[in-house]
Amino acid sequence: MDSTSTTDPALAQPLKDRTALVTGAASGIGRAVALALADAGARVYVVDVAAEAAERVARETGGEARVSDLSDPAAVEALPADVDIVVNNAGLQHVAPLHEFPVDRFTLIQKVMVEAPFRIIRRSLPHMYARGWGRIVNVSSVHGLRASPFKSAYVTAKHALEGLSKVAALEGAAHGVTSNCVNPGYVRTPLVEAQVADQARSHGIAESEVLGKIMLERSAVKRLIEPEEVASAVLWLCSESAGFVTGASLPVDGGWTAH
């Protein structure tokens, strides 16, 4: 056995000298991704609208907090562009029938979950192209591949993110840049927990029935996904081992899309 396999810094920290920007990084999937990338050696910009939580994660990762409202184009344009890794993770949810869905809420979700990723990718690609290396990982959802009732804005945004990711993959391939989506089912995050009451109201069932009847109904594995499991998939897509993987959508959905 090669004794250097556990001591080689390049193996222990494969992303050393890389800089990453992670949106929605103050909690949930984003925090788990920021921690995973930092453990792999990357310097992480922790981007979130929640200032205190972002600062806390920045301390945990040894990175830098950037408090930013991604619905504000000017705020997005002020984010660092000299990054090697972009993880577009920030998102929000609203559950309501389409004919009652608030137009302003629909617009907000598209701004945060489609326009902001577009702006971030657009600004980051010149740096990646100049270095001949880059990784774009878009935290999509099973709802980027499948639809569910009462989530018109979220499903629309995730499907759009899938298309954006594929275009970035095709354009970036000649420059050493990959672009992929990770597609989790329901993850144990504040965003999912906050949906329970709305789901119960929209479907006309008790809150206690939402997990089994709605969230896990189509999943073969009957549990919520942990944020760290999604972060592991993101970390792999950022690795050299995944250099030939681009334009892909990686389901982490317990078999949901196998139906």
Image (tube, helix red, strand yellow):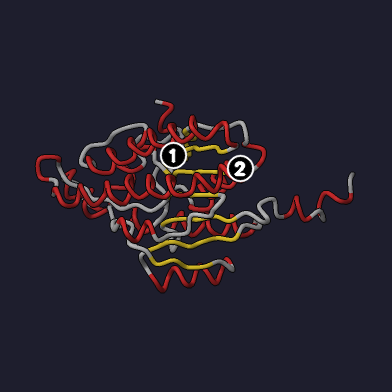
For label 2, the crowd category at 10 Å Cα-Cα, with few meaning under 14, some 14 to 19 and many 20 or more, is: many
Please tell me the numbered disc located at residue 210.
none
Q: Specify the quadrant of the image occupied by residue 162.
A: top left
The reply, left or right, for residue 96 in relation to residue 38 is left
Q: Specify the quadrant of the image occupied by residue 184.
A: top left
Question: Which residue lies under the disc numbered 1?
Answer: 183
The reply, left or right, for residue 127 in relation to residue 186 is right
Q: Is residue 66 above or below residue 106?
A: below
Dot 2 or dot 1, earlier in sequence? 2
- Furthest residue toward left: 99
Inspect this view and state whether residue 154 appears.
yes
Q: Give residue 10's position: percent from left, percent from top.
A: 75, 52
Q: Give residue 232's position: percent from left, percent from top.
A: 57, 47
Q: Secondary structure at mark 1?
A: strand
Residue at image position (16%, 52%) is 104
Residue at image position (63%, 43%) is 239
| Quadrant in which the N terminus is drawn | top right
For label 1, the crowd category at 10 Å Cα-Cα, with few meaning under 14, some 14 to 19 and many 20 or more, is: many
Residue at image position (39%, 71%) is 51
Instruction: Depth check: give the residue in front, 2 or 105.
Output: 105
Instruction: Please state which amino acid type lies under the numbered disc 1.
Output: Asn
Q: Is residue 46 above or below residue 97?
A: below
Q: Give residue 62's position: percent from left, percent from top.
A: 59, 68
| Quadrant in which the C terminus is drawn | top left
Q: Give residue 193's position: percent from left, percent from top.
A: 33, 56
Instruction: Depth check: give the residue in front, 121 or 22.
Output: 121
Distance from the alpha carbon under mark 2 to that under mark 1: 23 Å
Question: Which residue lies under the disc numbered 2?
Answer: 133
Residue at image position (38%, 48%) is 119
Instruction: Please state which amino acid type lies under the numbered disc 2.
Output: Trp
Q: Is residue 141 above or below residue 47?
A: above
Inspect this view and state whether residue 209 appears.
no
